[in-house]
Amino acid sequence: MKKSFTFYLWPLSNLIVILYALYIFMGAQEPLAIHFDAAGVPNNVVPPGMFLAIILMILFTSNLGLIVIYRFVDRLWPGYINIPFKEYWVSSESRQEDGKRMTKDMLSVVGIFVGVIHILCLLAIGDKLSPAIILPIALALSGVMLVGIFLMAKPPKQ
């Protein structure tokens, strides 16, 4: 099965997160704020080494489940994977192959979304973006992602 464009964007988004975390780590002279209250005021700080370890652990664990599901889509399809318009996608062998490909594309989009959210959080930690603006951006991106996934799964008109 040919890999889609989104499959290659997924690791790229994670690479950007790692590179930017390293950039922040290298420039940090003092403890870094890793948690902010609703007003955007930091309320938890950690040393730079701990910061890097936390970022890498969160990135790894948030992608691990997606990677496992991506690798086993062929075995999990269609019984354990819930997608919109499932009846359409399981109705014939060719549609099942298209459904598996589409499911992998959806997982890649979710992986890209995870990377983008991590980038937004790192921008706040690096003082490039106000922490108060992250929630509205994340909610807007969540809505766009959900609509996009729904449109990806929508069967073509007959």
Image (tube, grey):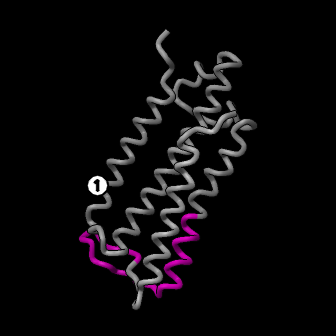
Q: Quadrant of residue 97?
A: top right
Q: Is residue 44 magenta?
A: yes
Residue found at x 50% / y 69% = 19
Q: Position of residue 136 (x, y in %)?
A: 28, 55
Q: Nearer the viewer, residue 105 or 85?
A: 105
Which region of the structure is painted magenta? 34-59
Instruction: Report how many numbered discs are placed on residues in the image.
Output: 1
Residue found at x 39% / y 66% = 121
Quadrant in which the N terminus appears = top right
User: How many C-alpha atoms fall within 10 Å of the one at disc 1: few (<14), some, or many (≥20)?
Assistant: few
Left or right: 34, with 15 as reference point: left
- Under tag 1, what secondary structure? helix
Q: Position of residue 87 (x, y in %)?
A: 59, 20
Q: Is residue 53 magenta?
A: yes
Residue designated by label 1: 136
Q: Nearer the viewer, residue 41 or 26?
A: 26
Q: Amino acid at mark 1?
A: Pro
**Does 44 sit above or below residue 122?**
below
Residue found at x 31% / y 54% = 137
